[in-house]
Image (tube, coloured by chain):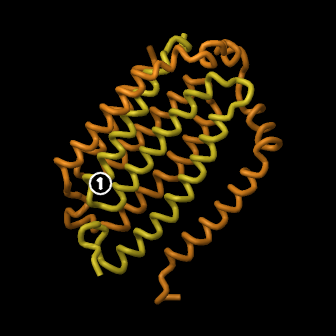
Chain colours: A orange, B yellow
Amino acid sequence: MLFYVFALLAIVSGAYMVLTRNLLYAGFSLLLTLLSVAAIYVLLFADFVAVTQLMVYVGGVLVLILFGIMLSSRVHDKSVMSENVNVGWGITIALLTLIGLGYTIWQAGFSSLPWLQQTDTDVLAGQKSTVQLIGIKLMTDFVLPFEIASLLLLIALMGAAYIATDKQKV
Amino acid sequence: MLTQVPLEHILLLSAALFTIGVLAVITKRHAVVVLMGIELIFNAANLNLVAFSRHDPQMMQGQMFSLFVILVAAAEAAVALAIVLRVYQHFKTANLNEVVS
């Protein structure tokens, strides 16, 4: 099954992101994780979300993170490496979180919930893409969050540009 | 074919990604890697939303919400990286343990 291939890819590259100490390797393994998650979105009938993930995360956030790595570390004297701290506590907390979440998911029995059972997912498989439906939703039910989101993006753009400018040189 | 993937497996994958993100946030010292862990946590939450949205074909509320989550995550990453760059210029390090005034 294709889903398990991409799930394995996402988990393995995510684990490599944590395990490696080279910042650039961590960035590129995060790229692989984001691509696998986008593929899983496609498999879950969410094509528009998958394309948004590709454009925003892979094309925007990841490039920004790579810029951040290169600008915030001296590449020539081996300080692209980063040390680990709190390894014991980190692994303990992460394992407890994983066990707790896994136990909860296993116990909750989502598959037997009535509103999940009575929906037939073949409706989604029949339609070609979700773009038209999402466009209609954005302009009717979600028009206020849409406008607020545009305002938030404008504020974030101005704030980031203001913070990052060098005040001494201007 | 994919409709046979049980919902629990998607949720377990999401839990694993969340755990990896938490591990990165706790154990890494470099500020940018902490940001990468936070992005991974966002992705895990989005995966849950999209997985449940598969059972809501008329309203698509999960997918709409995940779109807004992606948007806010992008804004957050831009501002946070700008702050990291300022911190690096001021303290000459991006190591979170050495950023002390």
Q: Nearer the viewer, residue A28 or A89?
A: A89
Q: Nearer the viewer, residue B77 or A62?
A: B77
* Residue type beneath disc 1: Leu
Q: Which residue is mark 1?
A: A23
Q: Nearer the viewer, residue B22 or A28?
A: B22
Q: Is residue B50 left or right of residue A133?
A: left
Q: Quadrant of residue A137?
A: top right
Q: How far across and how far down the image is residue A144, in percent?
A: 77, 52
Residue at 60% in and 37% down? A51
From where the camera sits, is residue A27 visible?
yes
Residue at 37% in and 74% down? B87
Density class for disc 1 (Cα within 10 Å; few <14, some 14-19, many ≥20) is many
Q: How far across and how far down the image is residue A58, in percent?
A: 50, 45
Q: Is residue A160 left or right of residue B10?
A: right
Q: How far across and how far down the image is residue B4, in percent?
A: 52, 11
Please, what secondary structure does the residue beneath circle 1 have? helix
Q: How far across and how far down the image is residue A105, in percent?
A: 42, 25
From where the camera sits, is residue A5 visible?
no
